[in-house]
Amino acid sequence: MSDSGERRSDEEPRWLNSQEKAAWTGLISLVLLLPGKLESPLREKHGITLFEYLVLSHLSEAPRRRLRMGELAFLASGSLSRLSNVIKRCEQRGWVVRSPDPADGRYTLAELTDAGFDIVGQAAPTHLRAVRGLVLDSLSTADQKALTRIAEKMHIVPDDFA
């Protein structure tokens, strides 16, 4: 095995047993199918994607409703190029403005406008209903804690993601 825990390609793979296959199938189904189910009501009611909502939501919670683009990309789990395209669309809609960071002009800040704050406020209940209906309401407190613990064990959720 390599230092990263990966098997070398010349070693025989460890095939999944039935429990491992069920766990993997459940996880990959969540990863691939849940985002679309969360996005659908946002698109239908507010004309925004899940990624756009996450970007706007993170900005709405930031001090003075602004963040450096790199930090925002990290928080929204997207690449800087994907974020730039989304921010450009949001600027065209009047929801976000970009400006150089006064603390360090090498960085660009994205700032949520009042119109952007309004769209987040309108979309938040829709998103919350989807999160509750698709995920949280069907899970017990123990299930929710297990999901949190699993994400922590897999190092999926960054420490400063809140």
Image (spheres, rainbow, N blue to C red):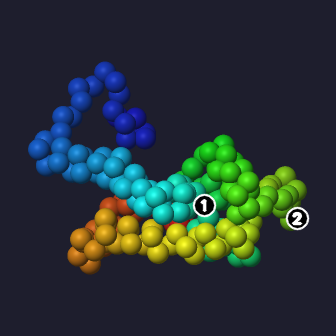
Kind of residue sitting beneath label 1: Val
Residue at 24% x, 46% y is 24
- Residue 63: where, in percent of width, then height? 70, 76
The percent coordinates of residue 4 (x first, y second) are 43, 41
Is residue 66 at all visible to an observer of this figure?
no
Judge left or right: residue 49 versus residue 143. right
**Label 2 element class:** loop
Label 1 Cα crowd, 10 Å radius (few <14 / some 14-19 / many 20+): many
The residue lying at 79 percent from left, 58 percent from top is: 98
Q: Which mark is residue 55?
A: 1
- What amino acid type should be assigned to the residue bearing mark 2? Pro
Left or right of 132, for residue 42: right
Which residue is labeled 2 in the image?
102
Closer mark to the observer between disc 2 and disc 1 = 1
Say whether residue 123 is visible: yes
The residues bearing labels 2 and 1 have C-alpha atoms spaced at a distance of: 21 Å
Circle nearer the N terminus (2, 1): 1
Question: Outermost residue, front direction?
Answer: 45
Residue 130 at x, y percent in the picture: 38, 67
